[in-house]
Image (cartoon, rainbow, N blue to C red):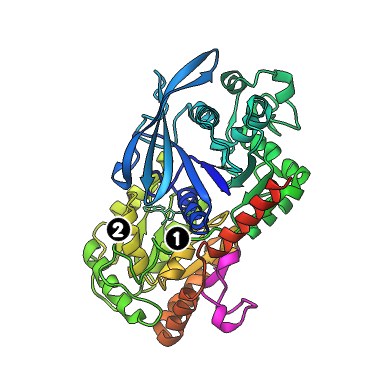
Amino acid sequence: MYIVMIAPECAPVAKVGGLGDVVFGLCRELEIRGHSVEIILPKYDCLRHDQIFDLRLAFKDLWVPWYDRAVHCSVYFGFVHGRKCFFIEPHSDHNYFNRGAFYGQVDDDQRFAFFSKAALEFLLKSNKHPDIIHCHDWQTGLVPVLLYEMYKHVGMTHPRICYTLHNLQHQGVTKEHILRATGLNRHSYFFHQDRLQDNFNHAAINMMKGGIVYSNFVTTVSPHYAWEILNTTQNFGLGHTLQIHRNKVGGILNGIDYDVWNPEVDRHIPRQYGVNSLEEKYENKRALRQRFWLQDALKPIVCYIGRLDEQKGVPLITHAIHYCLSHGCQFVLLGTSADARIGQHFARLKQHYNDNPDCHLELSFNEELSHLIYAGAEMIVVPSQFEPCGLTQMIALRYGTVPIVRATGGLADTVFDINHSDRPCHERNGYVFNHFNAPGLESALHRAIGMWYSYPPHFRELATNGMRYDYSWNHPGGDYLNVYELIRDK
Ligand code: ADP
């Protein structure tokens, strides 16, 4: 099969969170299985160019219709750790992708509507006829709309669209100008409840809703999240739309790339180890302590790695830091925030614990460092308010780092409580709490810390149980291919 991914992120060249990991990992798996895969990305100025091999001009003069003019673009091609990637670079005063950041600009709606249109225009002009176009999140929600309302009529009759929802919190709700910009000119037709009109703000259009309505199949990144968005109020207003289209909605658990995340061969950690040599993990703990000037003491290291965002449970992350430090643990945090208020909160906390030999808060994005923390810590907390899939707990499991998570979304699909799960003992791999509050978190932390201190062999067994799980792309790769086959035959 010939598959084209149109995505706003791809690890490690353009990664903000899990979406980037998923695009890279899934593409790799599909290629291993013999399929032809290409990825289309914006040519952000903040791409990690050191991760692109053999970057060269692939399509010099691509003219993308935009409002009542056309924008001149160049398309580059390069390999990202073996994946074939095209990068679209517009030459216009808007400087859409020269902002020093991936997201968070006031005109994000226009930036990604433009990208969606340019990606299709590129496929059309370069005579590419993929069997499947796979697009991701609100940033590419207009791809299926434009394909079926516009590009189909000029020859792109072949592709079918799989649309993956990584997070319903951000939907690309915007105004009518996006219709004019992209050439979707029939105002009253598109401003309709069955098409792009936002379910709450009737004067707005919703790009993610458009993606759901027009694509051939919609996936979310875990079965439990699929259930939650269809059956609870955790859908940020898209429940009605999802219900209407429920026959084409399904949940596929993300995988993680075991070539990147594998303590047996990880180049970013000082001592490799595996399920039969877990004691070697201690060398990484020592290295982590040295890196952050933490004291050498008989204490477990608890960590948090991830975006610092309301979704991730800011009050509970904060509470976990205080609780762990006052209950015989060390704490390491690696995270950044797109929200200035939250960023300041953690900056103050960092200052507060500056001289504490048991705590280090690293407020930056550092992929290499994250490997050392996964390998050096003994526990990871993931107290999310909601979590479509969550990769950090899956990576941690692979590194023998015991997850302590809230039972929501993909966390509920991947972590099984040592005391309360109905799974057999050898399949239990962590600590789970239900209620999004301090007592809930404490109940799980208390059990985990108690086990580490009082029953080290049991704690070790829990860690190795987690390491034995197969959360690679093997299963999800097959599931996505089944979806592609299903829609291709339609
Ligand atoms: P989300 O997609 O909501 O951000 P996920 O748990 O699905 O959360 O994916 C997070 C990914 O981003 C993981 O690979 C994690 O290691 C990585 N990550 C998050 N924050 C940082 C950071 N500050 N530095 C390095 N890697 C990070």
Closer to the camera in the image, 448 or 411: 411
Mark 2, residue position: 353
Q: Nearer the viewer, mark 2 or mark 1?
A: 1
Q: Depth check: 351 or 303 in front?
A: 303
Q: Where is residue 264 in the image (x, y as percent from the top left)?
A: 35, 72
- Residue at 70% x, 51% y: name it: 486
Q: Where is 146 relative to 369, above or below?
A: above
Tell me the SS state at disc 1: loop
Residue at (62% x, 22% y) in the render: 179
Please give the range of residues in magenta: 413-435
Residue 387, quarter of the rendered image: bottom right
**Circle 2: is it few (<14), some (14-19), or many (20+) Cα within 10 Å?**
some
Residue depicted at x 48% and y 68%: 403
Q: Is mark 2 on a helix, strand or loop?
A: loop
User: Label 1 belongs to which residue?
Assistant: 257
Q: What residue type is labelled 1?
A: Asp
Name which quarter of the figure residue 237 lies in. top right
Residue 409 image point, x, y percent? 60, 58
Residue lying furthest top in this view? 68
Q: Position of residue 463 (x, y in %)?
A: 45, 77
Q: Which of 187 and 126 is in front in this view?
A: 126
